[in-house]
Amino acid sequence: MKIALIGANGQLGTDINNYFKEKGLGVVGLTQEDIEVCDFNVCNEVLKKIKPDLIINTAAFHRVNLCEDEVLSSFKVNALGVKNLAKICLDLDIPLMHFSTDFVFGGDKSTPYTEGDCPKPVSLYGISKLSGEHIIQYMLSKYYLVRVCGLYGHAGPYGKGSNFVDLMIKLAKEGKDIKVVDDQVLTPTSTKDVTEKLYELIQTDKYGLYHMTNTGSCSWYEFACEIFKLAGLSPNISPTTSEEFGAKARRPRYSVLDNVNLRKIGLEDLRHWKEALEDYIKEN
Ligand SMILES: NC(=O)c1ccc[n+]([C@@H]2O[C@H](COP(=O)([O-])OP(=O)(O)OC[C@H]3O[C@@H](n4cnc5c(N)ncnc54)[C@H](OP(=O)(O)O)[C@@H]3O)[C@@H](O)[C@H]2O)c1
């Protein structure tokens, strides 16, 4: 199988690139120097030359606070870019694998969101990502639309500096006082684990919408405490509230995803987030 992978040097893209190649798949990794998803002509020329059997798009404008001001940029990448790729997939009659986010939900539940729950984003980032979802579902019948949550991976999210795990460890080593919100609940998720599950998913040809996260849940504060425990660090850390933290964009208070559709097609749940985190910290 030949795969065109967009965002090959990003956090998730790096793991997909390495793991899928290890598994013998023909991956053509594309960075933003090779392809600009907002430019249809560029996408068309680059992708039609590759002639892939599957396009994987990890590109996103996902600086959540910045999306509140740079609405046009977020919709260009998260919606228009997706439309460009969907059109090319239609022309080539191939599936598109695309990633969305737990931030399409509003946090009004206190039990895990399933794929059947109605999205209700509370930020422009969430709205732009949901638009991308709608475009795929409107234009294509062959797609893997995968919602992930709280990603961390060895490459770090490009443009954001470092992921949450590495940032916490850095702040602790610098002896900083650390405040972390305790009123937003998520599932921290390893890009390595997601990548392995994606590999299983593309063997199935079972298209559709999927939630894909590690299992279990915690607040960002509990996540930070677990990082410090596993890394053997004891910084001065205290819980805070979203209100006190005062980020520009609202975040859902609760955005845990239940991976119902993966189980329906016979794929096992990913492991518990604490186990995945332990491996990540050991490997670092
Ligand atoms: N990170 C999270 O916690 C999280 C949570 C939920 C959902 N997600 C979703 O998961 C997916 C992967 O996230 P990630 O953390 O791996 O992101 P990332 O590290 O920022 O990687 C994104 C990649 O996309 C490329 N890219 C950005 N804009 C582009 C454009 N206009 N044209 C072409 N390429 C472009 C970037 O290239 P450059 O590096 O050259 O800019 C980068 O390689 C995204 O769809 C995101 O919305 C992430």
Image: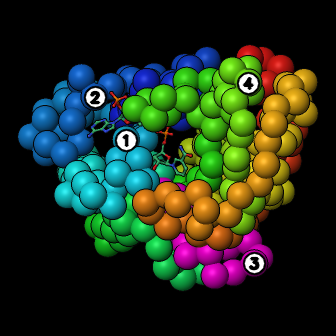
What colouring style does the render use? rainbow
Q: Are marks 1 and 2 in contact (CB under 8 Å)?
A: yes
Instruction: Look at 59% across and 34% down and name the residue there.
Output: 163
Q: Are marks 4 and 2 in contact (CB under 8 Å)?
A: no
Q: Is residue 228 above or below residue 78?
A: above
Q: Where does ligand 1 appear, by image quarter? A: top left
Q: Which residue range is magenta in the image?
A: 100-114
Instruction: Look at 61% across and 62% down and name the residue there.
Output: 244
Label 1 neighbour load within 10 Å: few <14, some 14-19, many 20+: many
Q: Could you say which disc has been placed on residue 110 in the image? A: 3
Q: CA distance from mark 1 to mark 2?
A: 9 Å
Earlier residue among tags 3 and 1: 1
Q: Looking at the picture, how far across and down is residue 63, in whole percent? A: 41, 47
Q: CA distance from mark 4 to mark 3?
A: 35 Å
Instruction: Look at 41% across and 54% down and name the residue there.
Output: 65
Q: Could you say which disc has been placed on residue 32 in the image? A: 2
Name the main secondary structure of what is drawn in magenta: loop
Label 4 neighbour load within 10 Å: few <14, some 14-19, many 20+: few
User: 43 left or right of 22?
Assistant: left
Please check the rendered image and state whether residue 264 is part of the magenta-colored stretch, yes or no: no
Q: CA distance from mark 4 to mark 2?
A: 36 Å
Residue under pointer 1: 59
Q: Secondary structure at mark 2?
A: loop
Label 3 or label 2, whichever lies nearer to me, is 3
Residue type at mark 2 is: Gln
Please check the rendered image and state whether residue 101 is part of the magenta-colored stretch, yes or no: yes
Earlier residue among tags 4 and 2: 2
Q: Are marks 4 and 3 in contact (CB under 8 Å)?
A: no
Q: Is residue 165 above or below residue 17?
A: below
Whether disc 2's CB lies below 8 Å from ligand 1 is answered yes
Q: Looking at the picture, how far across and down is residue 96, in whole percent? A: 39, 50
Q: CA distance from mark 3 to mark 1?
A: 30 Å
